[in-house]
Image: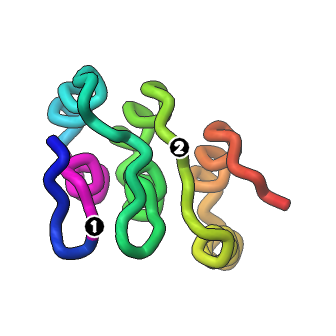
Amino acid sequence: MDAIDYLGRGVVHVVAHTQGLEEIAKYLVAQKNVNLDLLDSKARSALYLAVESENFAVARILANAGASIQSDNARMAKMLCCIGAENEIEKLNFLVQCGTNLE
């Protein structure tokens, strides 16, 4: 389960970015050899991608399994600005629930 693609994404990243793969996400988080906090070549975690893609079902599965919403500060700041500009309250609430530093 350590295979990565040309963007540095593991299988969890692909599942996080794709709608409708909740059962696969549940399977992956149950595995001991899956790194839920792997960062891709753009410094995005799978949980970050799930939130960015509005794939909240998979995002909840990852968050409940202890995955981190890690990303670099500039990318997180951009996401927060877009959330504010587009009034995406569900995304903002989810980020707060994940313990994202909003300062």
Relative horizontal placement of residue 28, taking residue 64 as reference (left or right): left
Q: Position of residue 92 (x, y in %)?
A: 65, 54
Image quarter for residue 54?
bottom left
Residue 49 sits inside the magenta stretch: no
In the picture of the structure, the residue carrying the numbered disc 2 is: 68
Relative horizontal placement of residue 102, taking residue 8 as reference (left or right): right
Can residue 65 be seen? yes
Q: Is residue 81 above or below residue 96?
A: below
- The colour scheme used here is rainbow
Instruction: Name which residue lies at 47% across and 37% down.
Output: 67
Q: Callout 1: helix, strand or loop?
A: loop
Instruction: Name which residue lies at 58% across and 75% down.
Output: 75
Which sits earlier in the primary sequence, circle 1 or circle 2?
Answer: 1
Relative horizontal placement of residue 62, taking residue 83 as reference (left or right): left
Instruction: Name which residue lies at 45% across and 64% down.
Output: 44
In the picture of the structure, the residue carrying the numbered disc 1 is: 8
User: Which residues are drawn in magenta?
Assistant: 8-20
Image quarter for residue 34?
top left
Can residue 54 be seen? no
Residue 16 sits inside the magenta stretch: yes
Q: Position of residue 28 (x, y in %)?
A: 22, 32
Q: Is residue 85 above or below residue 52?
A: below
55 or 44: nearer the viewer: 44
Q: Which amino acid type is marked by label 2?
A: Ser
